[in-house]
Amino acid sequence: MQLLYKLKNKILLTFLVIALSSCSVISEELSCKFSEINCYRFDYSSIDNFKDSVDNYSQQWSLSDPASALTKITPKEGLSINSSVEAENLILESPESIYALGIYIKNNQKPREWLFIAEQAYLRSWNTLGR
């Protein structure tokens, strides 16, 4: 009886270890290394491709129509961003700068996570559905 109890506990412990090791552990730092975070949802290869990718994303996730926000997108130059907080604040103050920020982050090899955070602020700037 005791042998069966020990075997049962070992099996339970083994399943628990397997379950925990299969989970993605995300620290307080956002990371594009995990599949749960789509850091490449928008296409920054051109303004038109960016607009199309935002429109497709909004349809895929049943967000508000981004048409009016997309007409305001500007190819701004002269950005200087040194943190994810600065990137997010730029978009909170000037959502139309999201494309320029994407180009800046790509060209200056800044962390893609900064862009993900700014994209979240951009989505909130025009999506009124509260998702």
Image: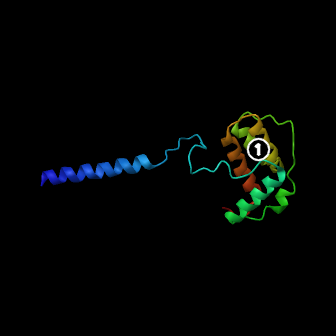
Image vertical order of residue 112 relative to residue 121, above or below: above
- Colour scheme shown: rainbow
The structure residue drawn at horizontal position 22% and vertical position 54%, both measured from the top left corner, is: 8
| Percent x, y of residue 120 | 70, 51
| Percent x, y of residue 119 | 72, 49
Residue 121 is at least partly visible in this image: yes
> Mark 1 Cα within 10 Å, few/some/many (few <14, many 20+)?
many
| Percent x, y of residue 66 | 79, 61
Image vertical order of residue 67 relative to residue 119, above or below: below
The structure residue drawn at horizontal position 72% and vertical position 34%, both measured from the top left corner, is: 109
Q: Which residue is mark 1?
A: 102
| Depth order, front residue of 76/42 | 42
Q: Secondary structure at mark 1?
A: helix
Q: How many marks?
A: 1
| Depth order, front residue of 123/17 | 17
Residue 129 is at least partly visible in this image: no
From the viewer's perspective, tell me whether residue 20 is left or right of residue 71: left
| Percent x, y of residue 55 | 76, 61
The structure residue drawn at horizontal position 41% and vertical position 48%, both measured from the top left corner, is: 20
From the viewer's perspective, tell me whether residue 13 is left or right of residue 88: left
The structure residue drawn at horizontal position 71% and vertical position 35%, both measured from the top left corner, is: 110
| Depth order, front residue of 43/8 | 43
Tag 1: amino acid: Gly
From the viewer's perspective, tell me whether residue 109 is left or right of residue 23: right
From the viewer's perspective, tell me whether residue 34 is left or right of residue 121: left
Q: Looking at the figure, which quarter contains the N terminus? A: bottom left
Q: Looking at the figure, which quarter contains the C terminus? A: bottom right
| Depth order, front residue of 48/15 | 48
